[in-house]
Structures are given as structure tokens and as C-alpha cells.
Amino acid sequence: MAASAQISRLHPIISPPLASRKPLISFSRFSPSFRCLSSPLSLSRPKTLTKPSFRNRVRASIRKLSESESIPIAKVPEDLDASIPAAAGVYGVFDANGELQFVGISRNIASSVDKHRKTVPADLCFSVKVGPADTATATADRTVLQSAWKSWVEEHISATGKPPSGNLQGNYTWTGAPPDLRLTPGRHVSLTVPLEDLIDRLVKEHKVVAFIKGSRRAPQCGFSQKVVGLLESHGVDFVCVDVLDEEHNFGLREKLKSYSNWPTFPQVFAGGELVGGCDIISDLAEKGELKAILQK
Amino acid sequence: MASRAANVVLSRANRMRQTLQSALEASVLEIEDVSYQHAGHAGVKGDANETHFNVKIVSSKFEGQNLVKRHRVVYDLLADELKSGLHALSIVAKTPKEIGS
């Protein structure tokens, strides 16, 4: 399939929707976190997407991006409900210049668009095109929605040569940043493995980890804030751990110093290895090497 | 006894200077106490006194060492200070070639 080959070539760059748990995803077997679904098209049925009749059904039920009309996003919530369906489906948000910024899928398109309207700058979130899942010909289950998402993104790539910028990995404008990681559920739970092992697992499971003072949204130290800012401005896909969180990361501050043989914070790890602290990250950013070092 | 007392009376900056200079034979060694800039931030116990420093070192001993290694060398040399209230270090560690001298 030329189209899926194109997407899988690009998938290191694009974050497919609802993909927060699994870093490496192939489009033919997807497991996003749709909770309330009992899908008639269960995932145990192999390769349903390649059956021609099914593909035609999907295409027929969810219209193409180019065939959808543009709906301006009202400033007032009440007007919004009227024009945008509260149905499941795929949607694309356009900026004030008419350029596609983001393609998303949702159980309730109106509610998702409203959320974007509240959190994304108005000039990026100007109008929307919707492709509601037509319940007569295809139920709105996850495979249908993902397939529609894929085809809308592919349509855009064929037209412009690149994916929408809001769908690129490391761009949190539309989806929000990943939550800070916690090593333990809390102090009431005693550890069954040594803290070092937890740290070791954590830095190996995630491509880029920043151990900082404070939370990602509210760092409590100038150096940590600077590191978070640099990583975000370079579009790095990373997670944070708050070393000051005594409830969920008790003992981390001291243990990490000996684990990394590094006495200060923040500490940035990539590929399981320490890259350095604020000085080194700043230096790499100045030399233009930051993204390369973190994403190899 | 007298020399130990003398060391305690010496400021942290001076102690750091002695340690770094003798170990690294630095051609440039600048130490600046910037603790006042960090007074009141999380993790600084008590008042911000001799807790945060900027250090710039130029030494040929850094040749062939990547940044992480150079920082570790400096941290190891200042281990005692880090255990006794030194909280953060901003380190610029270069070789003479890198600064073009």
C-alpha cells in the first residue's frame, strides 16, 4: 500500500492520535485509549484495513478533507455547538491564513474543537473542517477513525508535501505536554525493587527524560526552567520527573546524584545516558546540536 | 590546627580557587558567587550564602574530554564543597585552543 508506506516512513515525525503509551507504532495495529468502545471490528481480525470493500466503506462513510466545507470557529461557545457536530469523527483545524494546522480524531468533535479554542492561540485555531463518522455505513470505532485520520493526513501531504505542523512529534500545542512521570504511586506503597532500578528502567524506557526541580508547567528553579524551555522550543519529545516531589519520588534527589555520578539538577538523559545539566544543554543548543544529540 | 582554622575562615570562593587551580593548572580561572540571584528558590535551606557559583576555567587538561567528562572533573574536585552547602555550579570549561589563545 503506497499510502501506508508513506505514513510509516513518516511516523517517527508524526504523532498519531492518542499514542501516548507506545512510542513505536505501526498503523496496522493500533491501541489508543478509547475507553467506552466495544468494537464490532475487533483488533484480532487481521488486516481488515487492506480489504478493498472495507476501505471503500470507510471512504464512503467519512468524506475527504478536500470535500469538507470550512466552518469558522465561533468565539462564543453557544454558537459553536450549533455549527459543529457533537459526533465522533475526524477534524482538521485551519489557521487564519487557511493553512491546515492539525488533524485530530475525537468521540465528540464539537467538544474537542471547543477545547482547542480555549487553549490554542486564536490565529492558529480559526476554522475547522469535520468528517463525522456516518453511523449508517460504519460505526465510529477506533479503526474507522484512525483510518480516516490517516487518509486526511495523507491527503494533506500529497497536496503540500508535508504533514500539518501541529501533528509533528514534540509539538504539544494541540495535545498538551505529556504528564510528569512519577517513580512510585506514593509513600504509602513500599518499594519492591531498589530505587536505582526504577530510575534505570525509566531512563531506558523513554527517549528523553529531564529530571527537574518542580513540575514541567511550574519549574521551581531557574536552571530547570531554562532546560524545559530549551527542550520545548526545539520541539523535543520529552518527559519530566520532579525531583522535589517527596510524595511520589521520595529519595530520588539523593539517589539520582549517585546513579548519574552528577551532583546537581536538572539532569537530562537521552537514550538511557546522561547528556548533562543546564550548561551542557544550553551549550548544545547554541551550537545547534541539541536536537541531533537527543533524537539519535 | 591553625591551617584548618585558616581554611574555614577563607571564603568558599577562595577554597574553590585553590583546589581548582592546583589540580587543573588553569590559565584562566574565574569564580563568581551568584547566590544572591537564587535567594528564596526551592531547595535552598536557610539564607542563600555561598550556594551558587559561576565558574569559568580554561585548562589544557580538558583536551580530549567531552563536556560531561569536564564537568565531572570539576564536580569531583569540588565534592567537599558540594556536600557542605554548595548547591549549584554553572561551569564553562574550555581548552586554550577553544578560546583561540
Image (cartoon, coloured by chain):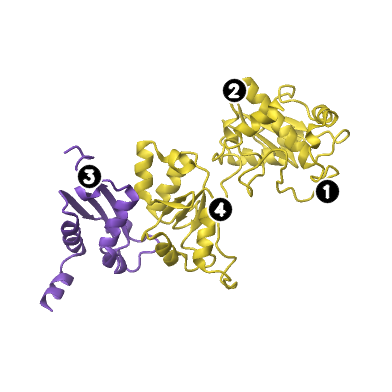
Name the amino acid type tagged 1. Ser
- For disc 4, the marked residue is A205
Residue A56 % position (x, y): 83, 27
Q: CA distance from mark 4 to mark 2?
A: 32 Å
- For disc 2, the marked residue is A161
Residue at the spot 31% in from the left edge and 68% down from the top edge: B83
Residue A171 % position (x, y): 55, 39
- Asked if marks 1 and 2 fall on the same chain, the answer is yes
Name the amino acid type tagged 2. Gly
* Secondary structure at numbered mark 2: loop
Q: Residue furthest top?
A: A159
Q: Which chain is drawn using purple?
A: B
Dot label at residue B95: 3
Which chain does tag 3 point to? B
User: Is residue B1 shown to the viewer in this render?
Assistant: yes
- Asked if marks 2 and 3 fall on the same chain, the answer is no
Nearest to the eye among marks 2 and 3: give it: 3
